[in-house]
Image: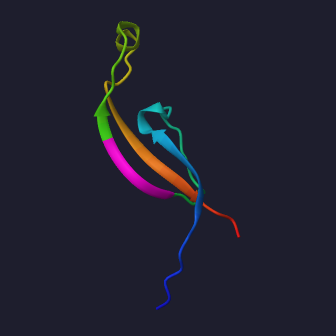
């Protein structure tokens, strides 16, 4: 079995709590490098607006197009 090395060019972070209710992300070919959860430092205004204080982040990258 031959293993092909993939090169990735674009990298970013997706905070899952930023997705709107009912939103769907599909059709992307992404590599998930890391998933982690952390406590966000929110302002009183953000708390009053119902922003989640625990965030789930995905560090993602997309493959280089040959």
Q: Position of residue 43 (x, y in %)?
A: 37, 11
- Where is residue 57? Give x, y as percent: 40, 41
Residue in the image at 31% along x and 24% along y: 53
* Residue drawn at x 35%, y 13% as measured from the top left: 47
Residue 36 at x, y percent in the picture: 32, 44
Residue 35 forms part of the magenta stretch: yes
User: Looking at the rendering, in which quadrant would you find the C terminus?
Assistant: bottom right
Please say whether residue 10 is one of the residues in the magenta stretch: no
The image shows residue 28 at horizontal and vertical percentages of: 59, 56
In the picture, measured across the screen, residue 37 lies left or right of residue 22, that is left
State the residue in front, 45 or 4.
4
Question: Mostly what secondary structure, the magenta segment?
Answer: strand
Horizontal relation, residue 52 to residue 27: left or right: left
In the displayed structure, would residue 31 be above or below residue 3? Answer: above
Q: What residue do we see at 40% from left, 8% from top?
A: 45
Which span is picked out in magenta?
Answer: 31-36
Q: From the viewer's perspective, tell me whether residue 4 is left or right of residue 37.
A: right
Q: Residue at x 53, y 80 (%)?
A: 4
Residue lying furthest bottom: 1
């Amino acid at each position: 079995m031959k293993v092909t090395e993939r090169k990735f060019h674009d990298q970013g972070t997706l905070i899952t709590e930023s997705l709107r209710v009912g939103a769907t992300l599909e059709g992307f070919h992404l590599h998930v490098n890391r998933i982690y959860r952390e406590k966000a430092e929110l302002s009183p205004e953000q708390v009053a607006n119902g922003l989640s204080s625990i965030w789930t982040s995905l560090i993602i990258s997309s493959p280089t197009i040959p």
